[in-house]
Amino acid sequence: MALFSRRKKSDSDDASVDRPDTTIEPGEQPVDPAGPSDAAPAAPAPAAPGESGAAPGAAPAPGAAPTHAAAAPGAAPAPATAEGAPAQQATPDAAAPAADATPNVTISMSSFRGVGAAPDAPAPTAVPPVAERPSARQPGAMEAPEAPETVPGLLDNVLLGNALAEIEGQPEPAQLLNIARQLLQGHVFLRVKGDARALLAEGKDLPLAVATRGDEQLVLVYSGGMPLRASVDADGDHDTSAMGQPVMALLRHVLAGPYGGIVLDPASGDNRAVLPKALLERMVSEADPDLRIKTALCETRTASTASTVADAIVAGAPLWIAVNRTEEGGPVGVAESRSAAGERFLEVFSHPLELLALGRGDQPLPITPPQLAKALVGDAGLTGVLVDQAGPWIRLDREELAPVIALATADAAPSE
């Protein structure tokens, strides 16, 4: 039963304790929790993210000749995970080893195989170009599926809901990494005791629903209207309202408070997850505060999506590349993917979790916009970049990357 800080009960695992006198960060959007009782949950799209299943036995693709790129600074460590997760929840630390820092090294960009490819090459417009190395996750859909509106006023976070829907029984570390990466976009729903709209109008503190785990408080977070309604039905407390909250504002509020983490969709059976505070801290510390690239990829695609992503790169949105050794003792390689037509795309990622969720064993290395520009100028054989291969993803060709490539010239120009 989900309880609230202003009314304690003792007959539930989700007992609460008094919240401190802090207010949630700006960005709240209270909505009417009343909705159609027969609203259907979002159905995952056929190629939506969350289709697990490695393809270690996929037919080998022809090898690619090595190319070279500009140097990049030291590798970013993998996102941290918290200790003390409940017994029924796996923690993602097994899938996210910290990368060794390799500052100021020159990296040869040799093509090595990435996500396991299917035996039959799919159409280039349907899936991203892939390489051949086994992976815990196949590439996701290029676009996010359409989100239903099960709570009037806000659309469900369908990408997060689909990631949670993958869990069957004990969650795998790779599944939790996928959930964490899909949390970094859009908004989530919170449960508030009473009328959230009236409380905000009166300037009062918002008593969020929390669960307790020992001495820890975990904020209850929902991917959509159906999981939220399931919680209300489970505890019978209908004196609550739903509030939509931008995910970064919610995470900052959790990290600034006395909470030990969050519980996602707590009344959804197996399709629930606990993300501990230490993981949330690392997620936020390595995320673009405005989530510019991820947001652009998750929204409905338009003719301006490519330019929006390119502009975000030029403006300094953080990016990572995937590095690994092609063989024991060999040089460090940078991951690229090839289309069925042989086009070469440098793989870049808007957050380390976007890479780690693929489960390939690669490590994230930050790359600056001028470094990316130099890599593209230095290797004329690169068709462009592939952003966030796990999906939603986008390919940008050289024409679309023209503002980025221009940075190489600007960086090389002598200062006056």
Image (cartoon, helix red, strand yellow):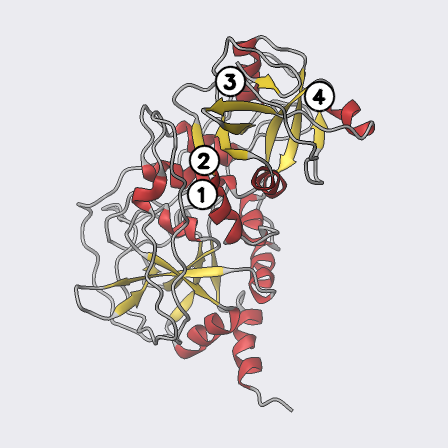
Which residue carries the number 4 mark? 32
Distance of label 4 from label 2 (alpha carbons)? 27 Å
> Which sits earlier in the primary sequence, circle 2 or circle 3?
3
Distance of label 3 from label 4 (alpha carbons)? 24 Å
The residue type indicated by label 4 comes to Asp
Q: Is residue 323 above or below residue 357?
A: below
Please state the horizontal and vertical placement of residue 223, each as a whole percent of the image.
53, 29
SS category of the residue bearing label 4: loop
> Which sits earlier in the primary sequence, circle 3 or circle 4?
3
The Cα atoms of the two marked residues, 2 and 3, are separated by 16 Å
Instruction: Report, in whole angstroms, how far the alpha carbon at label 1 lies from the one at label 4.
Output: 31 Å
Q: Of helix, strand and loop, which one carries label 1?
A: helix
In the drawing, what numbered circle is on residue 374?
A: none
Would you name the residue on which mark 3 appears?
14
Furthest toward the front, the residue is 215
C-alpha distance separating marks 1 and 3 = 22 Å
Q: Nearer the viewer, mark 2 or mark 3?
A: 3
Q: Amino acid at mark 1?
A: Leu
In the rendered image, the residue lying farthest to the right is: 202
Q: Secondary structure at mark 2?
A: strand
Mark with earlier residue (4, 2): 4
Crowd band around label 4 with a 10 angstrom C-alpha radius: few (<14), some (14–19), many (20+): some
Q: Is residue 366 left or right of residue 63?
A: right
- The image position of residue 324, as x and y in percent, is 28, 62
Q: Disc 1 or 4, which lies upstream in sequence?
A: 4
Secondary-structure class at tag 3? loop
Q: Which residue is mark 1?
A: 279
